[in-house]
Amino acid sequence: MATGFNFDTDLSSLEVATGGGNFEPPKPGKHSAFITKAEMTTSKSGRPMLVTDWMIDGDDEDAGKALTDRTVFTINKNGKTFIHFNIPKYFSAAGLWPADARERADLLSPQKIDATVKRVCENLEGAHATLVTRMSKPRPRLDDYGRPAYEHDENGVTILGEDGAPKPAFWPPRAEISSINFEAKKDTSNAWPVVF
């Protein structure tokens, strides 16, 4: 049965590659990277969230590997709501975090926030930064009802630990961004024209 795809290579004689290629996480540490995509979405808890997809570039041995950063707009500390500390970094890199508090409040107002976030997402694509990455700690898996999930064998039977209790299931560690330092945008507004 034909698939409709035009393959230039006969796949029937090729071996399957080992390893994960770009699906392997980058090594923890500093990496030069750029944003390939930025979008506004909603977190599992229902809060607005900025999701940025990054690609490591340059002569880094991890060049070509991808990372995703998910930043909720607000966090709660001691019963008070704050703007997440990475939001000003992203908005500044997009040219939309004015130094003047009144201008900034205007852009973040309920009347303008949707248009502001749309512009931020558009302006972020291609932005360069130095990222510091680390491996996350394993996180407990939860079922559809928010209860702890447990490990199962190939037959679907719950695996018991040495103590006889069900063995909790965990998400494996993943690469995460712990720090973002955007490169300063080159201001060409006052540059003299080049004459040949």
Image (cartoon, rainbow, N blue to C red):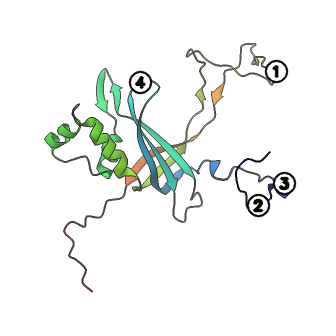
Relative side of 186 to 57, left or right: left
Tell which circle, 2 or 4, labels the residue nearer the N-terminal end.
2
- Which numbered disc, 2 or 4, marks the residue closer to the eye? 2
CA gap, disc 2 and disc 1: 38 Å
Tell which circle, 3 or 4, labels the residue nearer the N-terminal end.
3
Relative side of 66 to 107, left or right: right
Residue corresponding to mark 2: 9
Residue corresponding to mark 4: 46
Query: Considering the numbered disc 2 on the image, is that residue within a helix, a strand or a loop?
Result: loop
Query: Considering the numbered disc 3 on the image, is that residue within a helix, a strand or a loop?
Result: helix
Give the position of the N terminus as an image quadrant: top right
Name the quadrant containing residue 190.
bottom left
Identify the residue at the far bottom of this view. Answer: 196
Q: Are marks 1 and 4 in contact (CB under 8 Å)?
A: no
Give the position of the C terminus as an image quadrant: bottom left
Name the quadrant containing residue 151.
top right
Residue located 75% across and 21% down the image: 152
- Which numbered disc, 2 or 1, marks the residue closer to the eye? 2
Name the quadrant containing residue 130.
bottom left
Q: Amino acid at mark 3?
A: Ser
Asked if one can make out residue 94 in the rendered structure from this viewpoint, the answer is yes
Asked if one can make out residue 24 in the rendered structure from this viewpoint, the answer is no
**Any mark on residue 12, and which?**
3
Q: Amino acid at mark 2?
A: Thr
Residue located 45% across and 48% down the image: 37
Tell which circle, 2 or 1, labels the residue nearer the N-terminal end.
2
Q: x%, y% of residue 16?
A: 79, 52
Q: Are marks 2 and 4 in contact (CB under 8 Å)?
A: no
Residue located 77% across and 48% down the image: 2
**Any mark on residue 155, and which?**
1
